[in-house]
Image: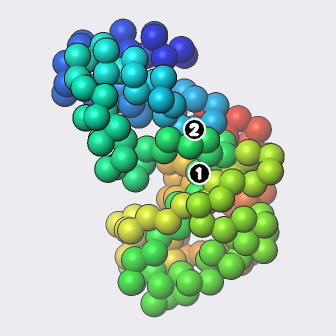
Amino acid sequence: MKREEIIKKYKPEKDNLLLILQEIQDNNELNYISEKDMEEVSKYLNVCMAEITGVVGYYSMFSTKPRGKNLIRICCSPVCCMVGGEKIERIFKNELGIGIGETDKNNEFTIEETECLGQCGNGPVIMVNDKVYTELSAEKIKEIINKHRHNANGKK
């Protein structure tokens, strides 16, 4: 769906800002919000551009730079770290050749850190797109990567 179609689905009310931005990002094949996206939302909602960029910058779910089709969020909370979370990044580095904040050369995967995914009793934990994976091991991570690698459309 195109940016203009997404924006017009919503009433031009400031309360719709997060919904509009999330849908624009979800429909962008590179999984981010562009400067032009923010400008159009700013005009439609009659909100200054600084407010839009402030919201996009504040929420970790939003990105202003292109990302892979599959967004991997690694929980870096103290609880996940205590149960082996510190090894998760190394496993992904070995499997995908990328670390935190990086995207692989095929634009299939981007890895980011997140503070907590709310699964403290089942750590270590990651989220790939909208799905949470718990009690991770190297074998389980390889399975997750292969599952998403073979899903050419990622979360779309």
- Here the colouring is rainbow
38 vs 1, left or right, is left
* Residue 31 numbered mark, or none: 2
Task: Please tell me in which quadrant of the rendered image residue 152 appears.
Answer: top right
Picture residue at 51% right of the left edge, 77% below the top? 124
* Residue assigned mark 1: 71
Picture residue at 23% right of the left edge, 16% below the top? 46
Proximity of marks 2 and 1: CB atoms separated by less than 8 Å: yes
Q: In which quarter of the image is the C terminus?
A: top right
Q: Where is 102 relative to 148, above or below?
A: below
Element at badge 2?
A: loop
Confirm whether residue 147 shows in the render: no
Element at badge 1?
A: strand
Picture residue at 52% right of the left edge, 52% below the top? 131
Image coords of residue 81 (percent x, y): 47, 85
Distance CA(mark 2)–CA(mark 1): 8 Å
Task: Please tell me in which quadrant of the rendered image residue 91 appears.
Answer: bottom right
Q: Quadrant of the N terminus?
A: top right
Q: Nearer the viewer, residue 110 or 36?
A: 36
Task: Please tell me in which quadrant of the rendered image residue 95 appears.
Answer: bottom right
Image coords of residue 13 (percent x, y): 19, 18
Q: Which of 101 and 129 is in front in this view?
A: 101
Identify residue type, mark 2. Answer: Asn
Image coords of residue 10 (percent x, y): 30, 15
Sequence-wise, the earlier of marks 2 and 1 is 2
